[in-house]
Structures are given as C-alpha cells and as structure tokens.
Amino acid sequence: MHLLFLRKITVMPDFHKLSIQHIKRETSQAVSITFDVPSELKETYAFIPGQYITIKTEVKGEEIRRAYSICSSSKSGELKVAVKEIKDGTFSVIANNQLQVGDVLEVHPPEGQFILNTNANVANTYAAFAAGSGITPIMSMIKSILEEESNSKFVLVYGNKTLDETIFRSELLELQTAYPDRLFIEFVYSRSQEDQAHFGRIEKPTVNYVLKNKFKDTKFSAFYLCGPEAMIKTVSSILEENGIDKNQIYFELFTSSTEETEIDANLEGKTSVTIIVDDEEFNFVMDQKKTLLDAALGEDIDAPYSCQGGVCSSCICKISEGEAVMEKNSILTDSEIAEGLVLACQAHPTSGSIKVDFDDV
C-alpha cells in the first residue's frame, strides 16, 4: 500500500537543556510534561502542529533517546508532550514515576513531516483517526485549527481500550463544548461499552459510519491517521475504497509491525563507508550485517536518530553513491526511495563502498 507522507526535511540544531515547568497526570498510565522554554530559544522551539521533539537522557550510564509528539497548539507558547507508560519501558517509566518539576532534560528542537499547516483564510473540514497515544499530534492539530482557522471544522475518531485509558478525554470534551459546531468526536472503546460511544476497534464499520452516515454530506480536505501500523493500514484502505484520494491521507506510526522481515540480499561482506553529518566527513569500514545507524554510532559519529525502529523520520539520509537495502519501510514513498533516501536505522549496505549524506535531505 502506497500512502502519501508530507515531507519537509531540514537539518535541525542540537539538543538544548530545558527544565520541566509542569507535570500533569492525564491517566493512570500517562502524564503530560510541559517544558520551560527560555525567551532566547522560543524561535528554535516553534513548531508546526503534528511535529515531535526528541528527549535525550542517561539511564544507568547509557544514553537513550525517545521521540514524543507535541500536544499543545502552535500559538499557545507551550511546549508540551504526553508520555504513556510502557510495560518494561525505560524513559516512559521514569517520566510517569520519577520526573519532577524543575528537572532538566536535553530536548531536540521540533521536527517531523506529519504536519498540518494552518491558514486563517480557509474553510476546511479535517478528519483524524487516532488510537491510544496516537492522539498526541492530533491534539495539537485540533487545538491549532480551532484557534487559527475560525471557519474550519474537525472530526475526530478516537479509539482506546477503556474510558479511563483515554488520554485528554476531559480536555477534548471541554473543547467540544466550547466549539459545538466545529469539533465532532466519535469515541471508540474495545474493552468497555460506554454511552454515546462505539464498541470495538477502529475498523471498516466505524470508518463507513463517518463517511457514509453521520458526515455523508461533508467534503473532507484531509485525513490524518496516527497510531499502530495495523490501524493505519486498515483505515487507509477503507478510505481509498470510498474514493478518497491517497494524496489526502497523511499518517504517522506510533508502533510498527513486529513481524521480522527477511532481506533479499547477501550481507556477509564488508563495506567502505563515507558519512557526511553537519558538514563533517567520516570514513570507516563496516560489517554489512549492521545497519548504517548502528555502524555510525559505533564510530562515535553524532548521526541524527530517535526511535531506532523505523517509526519516526529522524535518521533519514541520502545514499549518493553505492547501494543499501532496508529491513522495513513504512515512511518513505517510492519516489523518495528512488531519489536515494533511506532510513539509516533500517538500512544495510550491499555494495563494496557507499556514501551516506545526512545533510542532503
């Protein structure tokens, strides 16, 4: 399945140390964290609704990086993310149980291509399908549209297991009350039956209910999908079945498929690598069984990365010479791959030499 991903890649500044201004318990398993951004860094941390930040910290002497979508509106002056606690997780457990106001974390400026550019002069209707913590970038989009596009409307289909696990539920209901003619929400619960909510998962009946029933006379300008890969593939397929142009569908994965992918290539050799990062050139020889990102980090090269799972887009780079093959790809389009773009965390070199440019993307 080919899905359009709105891409706008730029080389971003380094991490800055930001203190935590506020922590709010959103659910029993999730907190929101607001950072205090100094006035001299306000422009650096300006963002487009849908973008994310990468948080870097050290745990037991080991550096970890995690990407979290911004959930505040672009004009609010706030830099806020939500972190859901993951069983056996690292930073998510710390965020939900140990972080305190005043703690300092290293934060990378906003980035990401899952974006919604607002325009005060338009009158659009947007739809979003979100599951679980996939609500976070969508929340930023909703609030920004309500604040900045006074003639636009937003339809949200939001799936969770139970009511208690629904991040931002109270805030969403408050927004719906404040904007009854502009914000419409369809809650979906898979493990509890609730009044005025759908039971089950976000699947074909739910999508068709939105398109063919409740909003059958509505012309949607764009669809934004965020959550697990299975949900995104299902909803995208159904939207296209209903005649929605795939160029109107934008998505961001929060979890990718756990299925192992066999690479149709012999990775028994070694490759001579040239890597360009921040206008510096590095040369070394690597084992083809390693990914380009792992090899670069092993050489103490400060290559950009965050999730290391092929979900975010932080490690996109361009192969200007040589060849590489990716274990999996749910982000890059066919045309971008044809241009030589790869995800460094998924790419293995297959040629005797290769030139990798993190700046030319």
Image (tube, rainbow, N blue to C red):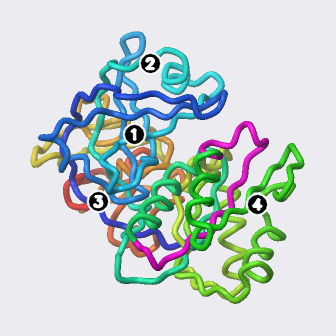
Identified at 50% across, 61% down, the residue is 142
Mark 1 lies on a secondary structure that is loop
Lower sequence index among marks 1 and 4: 4
Q: Residue furthest front?
A: 178
Residue 103 position, x and y percent, is: 34, 18
Magenta range is 149-169
Residue 342 is left or right of residue 98, and the answer is left
Quarter of the rendering containing residue 304: top left
Measure the C-alpha gap from mark 1 to mark 4: 28 Å
Q: Position of residue 54 (x, y in %)?
A: 36, 39
Residue 11 in the image: above or below residue 105: below
Nearest the camera: 161 or 344?
A: 161
- Foreground tag (3 vs 1): 1
Which residue bears the numbered disc 4?
202
Query: Residue 83's spot in the image, x, y percent?
Result: 52, 34
309 over 49 or under it: above or below? above
Disc 1: which residue:
306
Q: Is tag 2's residue or tag 3's residue first in the polypeptide sequence? A: 2
Instruction: Name which residue type carries label 3.
Output: Lys
Going by the picture, which residue comes out furthest to the top?
A: 60
Q: Which residue is mark 3?
A: 318
Q: Could you say where residue 217 lies in the image, as x and y percent from the top left?
A: 69, 89
Lateral position of residue 9 relative to residue 291, left or right: left
**Amino acid bearing label 4:** Ile
Q: Dots 1 and 2: beta carbons under 8 Å?
A: no
Q: What's the residue type where badge 2 is placed?
A: Leu
Q: Which mark is residue 288?
A: none
Q: Residue at x 47, y 66 (%)?
A: 146
Q: Which of label 2 and label 4 is nearer to you?
A: 2
User: Which marked residue is nearer to the observer: mark 2 or mark 3?
Assistant: 2
Question: First in sequence: mark 3 or mark 1?
Answer: 1
Q: Circle 4 — which element?
A: loop
